[in-house]
Image (tube, coloured by chain):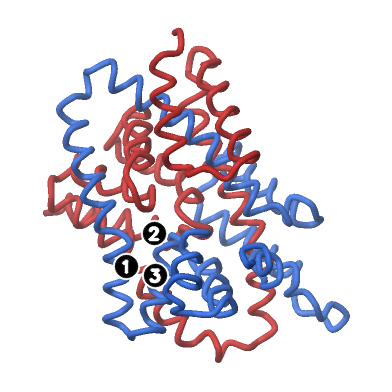
Chain colours: A blue, B red
Amino acid sequence: MAYLREYLVRREEWMTDEQFLDAMEVSETLPGLNAVNMSVIVGDDLRGVPGAALAVLGMLLPGAIVVMTLGILWESNRQNPLITRLLEGVAAAAVGLLMTVTLQLGRRQFRQFPDIAIIFATFIAVSVLKLSLPLVLLTIGPIAVLLYRPHPSRPHLGESLPFHRGEHHEKHRR
Amino acid sequence: MTRILHLFLVFALLGVLAMGGGTAVLPEMQHMTVHTFHWLTDKQFRDIYSLGQVAPGPNMLMVLVIGYRMAGALGALAVGIGFFVPDCILTLVVNRWWEHLKSPWRVSVQRGMAPVAIGLMLSGTWAIAKLAVFGAIRINFEAMALALAVFAILLWRHVNPGLLVVIGGVIYLFLPH
């Protein structure tokens, strides 16, 4: 996301920081990969549906070609212990990356109640109780939304959104 | 043909369930592809996940390899369209309507779903950790050390995470085992 912001906002000047964060808000809320959702929004805002389609292709096609090539190579070398060992190492290193990303995206949520409770309830439901994802989303989801239902005494709820403007706003600016 | 349709439907479902990105849907994807439909073994799932880490672009492009493995190029295409296109259409529609959705509930949904997404990412991380670090027989301490080292480096410095993961894999080749 830092790269995306660097290119879209600073180098190409296709959008302002504020537009970027608005786009981020939409793409975070919807299902799907963030990078792909961002491509749809940026492409659509700049050039309509064809822009969105091309932006998504641009985001996915190079990686798709590489991953397919690797997949075909892997199919024919699956018995090679060196390849297996390498992929085992990559998976282990990826765990470290996933830990970092989860912690960074959730840094606000890990610090406040009831978010911590929702995080752990979701984790336990999926990883310990092995409940199916639709069931988890349809039970914990509405409960979580109701916990944050609109309330006249909490008008500034939006300020604690994960990507609300202000938080990253100054960080990448010089 | 039924297999292609089956792949398409399963990955379309996984795509729309991906609240909070690709990592969030990993446990469900593993459950469906390994346990429900027996398309892959746990080890194959882990290896294909690693291929996605090595390739540029979103890691979740690894779903294409699952499709290819099951039904060739057409399978990869079916999985790709199923996993990515419905979400794209949804985003396109919602993006155009977003400004009209000024209801205070919009913030409630965002605010409430944020910790759910983090919890799902935690589950996705755990799913890969179980495959890579906590083996069926014993804990793989080299793998655990590597995961913690990557974690520490990324918290400490801004380095290209994709590159770091690949370097980590290469270093792992030389660790004693």
Distance from disc 2 to disc 1, alpha carbons, whole Å, reads: 15 Å
Give the residue type that dot 2 points to. Gly
Dot 2: element:
helix
Query: Counting other residues with Cα less than 10 Å from the Cα at mark 3, is it few (<14), some (14-19), or many (20 or more)?
Result: many
Identify whether B93 is placed above or below B47: below
Mark 3, chain letter?
Answer: A
Q: Residue B15 carries which label?
A: 2
Give the residue type that dot 3 points to. Ser
Dot 1: element:
helix
Mark 1, chain letter?
Answer: A
Residue B132 x %, y %: 46, 26
Identify whether A104 is placed above or below B98: above
Distance from disc 3 to disc 1, alpha carbons, whole Å, reads: 5 Å
- Mark 3 and 1 residues: CB-CB less than 8 Å, in contact? yes
Quadrant of residue B123 within the rendered picture: top right
Report the residue at 72% width, 70% height from top.
A146
